[in-house]
Amino acid sequence: MFKVLLPIFLSLYTVTNLNSQNKIWDETEAEKTERLSWWTNDRFGMFIHWGTYSLAGRHEWVKKHERIPDEDYQKYFEHFNPDLYNPTEWAKMAKEAGMKYAVITSKHHEGFTLFDSKYTDYKATNTPYGKDALKEWVDAFRAAGLKIGFYYSLIDWHHPEYTIDRVHPQSATTDVEYRKLNEGRDMVVYRQYLKDQVTEILTNYGKIDILWLDYSFPGKNGKDRDDWGSVELMKLVRRLQPGVIVNDRADLKEYAGGWDFTTPEQFKVAEWPTYEGKKIPWETCQTFSGSWGYYRDEHTWKDNKQLLVLLIESVSKGGNLLLNVGPTGRGTIDKRAQLALEQMGDWMRVNGRSIYGCTAAPPAFKVPDHALLTYNAKTNRLYVHLLDYPLQNFTLNNMKEQVKYAQFLHDGSEIKITAPKGHWIKQELGAGDINLNLPVNKPDVEIPVIELFLH
Ligand code: GLC
């Protein structure tokens, strides 16, 4: 008996011990839920990738993709002068699209900071533009009532002490080459730089709602939490901004308080993501086309329906959508992006009720064919998003007892609950089923939504 129990006790001891060592921040589940509540309610945010790469206009990874040395990349810094930059207009576009928060690249992988930093010369204030572009952005977005998020790249392709790794523009092929390239580079110095800059962005701009650190790539010639000093960094973050919501890319998955939400990027999750068997907060980040930074000649733009489905489907699985724009080197948001935002706004204005404050429907509700369900627990309403508009009969299985009233969400017009129509074949309903009688014509909204008031 003892022999059987001892290893169990020992492993339990190690697990508890490890957990207490792996604690960055003390917070109960309920406190965390409360801290994240505005974010899980708001569901829809704007991501903004803007930096020196916007001038190249061919992907924010252009420095790596084309292996551009610092000297040649310098021209984008020297020409950074967004004369048409008007963050108030950006904020208006975000708001009108139905977005409630925004996250901007305070620094991306190329190392350039939109903010004025004491610790580098490679910053917006030293370009012809000459101003703290981040400060202007914060002021405009905050004034518009949007929540404020900073993306900050852990990766840095400009800092002289940052060691060359496999994603660096100067990445090598052999260990010998790496050793040679990294002679004299000291990550201790870079770690301090990270702390200093994160301190700057979390102290000089008031209350910051989201921090988006990007990203770790452990393994050979990679970088992980030890390279970034992530544990110390995150303790600093929690101390400076106790209310901030942080993503999960600093390689601190096993650490309590090391992250708040997970970040599936550029794909759709099959189901609500879990960690250690528990559903976790999540936000998918997506682009309009195949690049985050402005890409003039890229043409794989998603259409309005695809974008709306991304949003609805995320909420139907309990998640958020952070949808990206890549402003141009002159500081404008190009026509394609503007149109995409406007179209989303048209839909959100009348259908936002199926998004804000909503989450996955209780599993007891069967999802009808070609539809996505979201649910608002506070109002006890269920939303059926019709991805492929049905022909008059729309059956809801096992919902007879629950449904009190049905209407289209976009215009609040009643949808009658009737027996199914049918010629030659009689459509039978199951005992618990009901049928909604839809008009033949699809309403003039990209994805019509049925709002069901439940008992
Ligand atoms: C990746 C890319 C980066 C982009 C980010 C957005 O980590 O490296 O360019 O900023 O995804 O999630």
Image (spheres, rainbow, N blue to C red):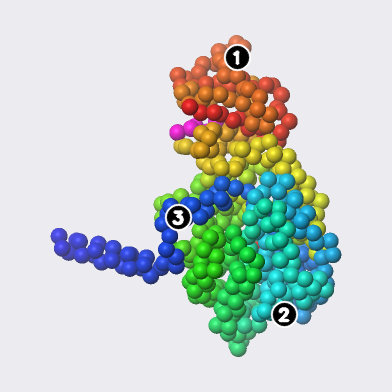
- In the picture, the quarter occupied by the N terminus is bottom left
Residue 367 counted in the magenta span: yes
Question: Measuring 58% from the left and 83% from the top, which residue is drawn there?
Answer: 189
Which span of residues is magenta-colored?
364-368
**Measured Cα–Cα span from mark 3 to mark 1:** 53 Å
**Magenta span: chief secondary structure:** loop
Residue 90 picture location, percent across and down: 75, 55
Say which amino acid is labelled 2: Asp
Residue 425 picture location, percent across and down: 57, 13
Q: In the picture shown, does residue 248 fall above or below 119?
A: above
Residue 183 picture location, percent across and down: 60, 88
Q: Does the CB distance between marks 2 and 3 fall below 8 Å?
A: no
Q: Which mark is residue 121?
A: 2
Left or right, residue 347 beside residue 214: right
Tell me where residue 181 sits by quadrant: bottom right
User: Which residue corresponds to mark 1?
Assistant: 422
Q: Which mark is residue 305?
A: none
Q: Of callouts 3 and 1, which one flags the residue occurring earlier in the amino acid sequence?
A: 3
Say which amino acid is labelled 3: Glu
